[in-house]
Amino acid sequence: MRIGMFSDSYTPYISGVVRSIQTLRQGMERAGHEVYVFGPRYPAALGGPGDPQEESRVVRFPSVAAPLYPQFRIPVPRQSRVREAVARLGLDILHTHTPFVMGRMALDAARMLNRPLCFTFHTRYDVYLRHYAPGAGSVLAPALNAYVRRFCNACQLVIAPTRAIAREVAALGVQAPIEVVPTGIPVGRFAGVDPTERMRVRCQLGFASQDVVLLYTGRLSREKNLPLLLQAFRLLAAERPAARLVLVGDGPLRESMERAVAAWGLSGRVRLPGAVPPERIAAFYRAADVYVFPSVTETQGLVVIEAMAAGLPVVAVASEVSHEVVAAGEAGLVVADEAAELAAACRRLVDDPALRARMGRAAQQAAQAYDSDVILARILKLYQELLAETRRRPAAVP
């Protein structure tokens, strides 16, 4: 098959959506399929253009910097160019990972060229709106939800990464078929223990072997609930001298978090190393003892699955998604959205190496269900079903 992936972000930008597309693309190409990614062009200052071989199957479009966060680019494509590229490349199926700019382009091409279109619901858009526009979010959310509902209903299939998100999508009034298919990860890349690598990363961070390292990976942004994590660690640090915290990632909150760490006298115990290339992230998981995830806005939490695959017990703030993914009490602890509760759960794991080990083993076992090869087979089966259905329906008249 020839598959087109559409996204409002792609490499060199780092995010869960980008990594999910990369993992899916790599698996499909290993299986003999051709995959083309349609996304924004990035200026050299942000790392673009990338490797020529990688870029040979990426269709880039002009972009502009997003307000307040210039690292994120908003694509500005010409509809005719997208349609021409889909036809020229002979794409069999279109898979969008956004309902917005590139999603609209995919929808137009699918209609005009009689291609099946599926959409993966990666983001809780109304929740993000309330975080980034707290004053207007409650007013604009109904209109946003109505738009997302119409977009979903224009697709032949909507993929939800968890059962909790499938319920939310259905509650929006989506009538299109909804399938629950998690985003996969290459589980083997994160599994295994390398004591030398573990100590190397700890030394780079300035941490000792006896320190108990708590880890967060992801964007440093408002919707990730990171102020709560810092507040919880402040409480924990006052009681447990061996506790350390590493926040891997970048984003608009990084500077304010660095200032808070310094103001609270935690500079010797908290590290913010910035964004880490995907090929290096596994080393940080192996250097840690506990994974902490405060976000309640996730549709799955890809980084949580990565941490579990690395054998880390998880402490997560309660949401329907975290309860579903973490399997509370087995692979980790799920707690209320309060600093004291989060600190208490972290304290429990800091104090109990045997509990960390037991939950880490359970986490690693649970992560096997998310292996990218398992997920790839499910996605390809859905593609085949969509193709068969599309061939039975008449093409649209341009």
Image (spheres, rainbow, N blue to C red):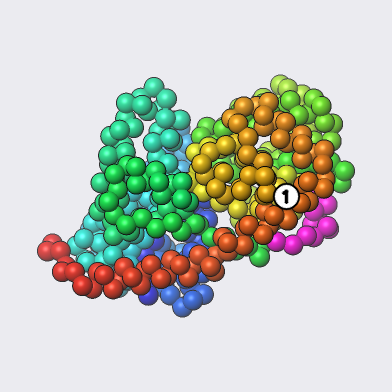
Furthest residue in direction left, as rendered: 397
The residue lying at 50 percent from left, 61 percent from top is 22
The foreground one among 180 and 253 is 180
Left or right relative to 100: residue 73: right
Whether 213 is drawn above or below 201: the answer is above
The residue lying at 81 percent from left, 27 percent from top is 239
Q: Which residue in the structure is indicated by mark 1?
A: 359
Q: Is residue 65 visible?
A: no
Neighbours of disc 1 within 10 Å: few (<14), some (14-19), many (20+): many
Does the magenta portion include 191? yes
Where residue 230 appears, as percent x and y from the top left, is 67, 29
In the image, the segment drawn in magenta is 190-203
Q: Secondary structure at mark 1?
A: helix
Where residue 260 appears, as percent x and y from the top left, is 67, 25
Majority secondary structure of magenta residues: helix
Q: Quadrant of the C terminus?
A: bottom left
The residue lying at 67 percent from left, 29 percent from top is 341
The foreground one among 53 and 106 is 106
